[in-house]
Image (cartoon, rainbow, N blue to C red):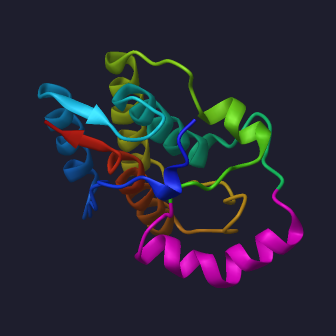
């Protein structure tokens, strides 16, 4: 298992909207690429899509971050994560890992999950409470999803 906090050569991405995210995933899939981290492009795409659905539907096993982490998340991390970047190497609680992380993924299935997640985000305004950052508006959730995707897709390098 690669310590993703120390990976060199990651790309720094910035998506202004979900169309840019989808275009980048299509571009990466259509050309040779390599993964610098622990996940393939398909695993990343499935993870990002499932998290989008989870922000609307909730989780089957809700994450319980420790109280100090939730306080820090709401007061200090929220502005950073929504406006700057999601850092690599964060280890979510085991329940979250089981539901939102995948050992294998088929790209076509993963891309379908991502596309339907983006569609739902654009057409449904209801969102659950983020387990670390607290209550977020739909617009804040959208920013979170874009920053989250930027971090993960930064581990996929074209060429």
Judged by its main secondary structure, the magenta piece is: helix
Residue 129 in the image: state x and y as whole percent. Answer: 69, 59
Q: Quadrant of the N terminus?
A: top right
Identity of the residue drawn at 59% across and 32% down: 101
Q: Relative to 68, does residue 151 appear above or below in the rendering?
A: above
Residue 123 in the image: state x and y as whole percent. Answer: 40, 47
Identity of the residue drawn at 71% across and 30% down: 98
Report the span colored magenta.
Answer: 65-87
**Nearest the eye: 16 or 138:** 16
Is 80 left or right of 23, judged from the image as shown? right
Question: For residue 84, which quarter of the picture?
Answer: bottom left
Question: For residue 143, which quarter of the picture?
Answer: bottom left
Residue 136 in the image: state x and y as whole percent. Answer: 59, 68
Residue 126 in the image: state x and y as whole percent. Answer: 57, 54
Q: Quadrant of the C terminus?
A: top left
Q: Residue furthest bottom?
A: 75
Q: Is residue 69 magenta?
A: yes
Q: Relative to 130, does residue 25 appear above or below in the rendering?
A: above
Q: Is residue 105 magenta?
A: no
């Amino acid at each position: 298992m690669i310590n993703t906090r120390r990976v060199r050569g990651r790309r720094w991405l910035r998506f202004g909207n979900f169309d840019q995210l989808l275009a980048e995933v299509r571009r990466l899939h259509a050309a040779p690429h390599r993964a610098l981290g622990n996940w393939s492009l398909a695993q990343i795409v499935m993870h990002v899509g499932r998290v989008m659905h989870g922000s609307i539907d909730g989780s089957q096993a809700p994450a319980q971050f420790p109280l100090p982490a939730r306080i820090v998340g709401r007061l200090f991390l929220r502005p950073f994560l929504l406006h700057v970047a999601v850092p690599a190497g964060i280890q979510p609680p085991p329940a979250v890992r089981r539901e939102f992380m995948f050992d294998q993924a088929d790209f076509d299935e993963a891309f379908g999950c991502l596309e339907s997640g983006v569609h739902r985000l654009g057409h449904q305004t209801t969102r659950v409470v983020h387990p670390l950052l607290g209550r977020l508006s739909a617009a804040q959730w959208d920013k979170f999803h874009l920053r989250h995707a930027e971090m993960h897709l930064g581990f996929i390098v074209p060429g």
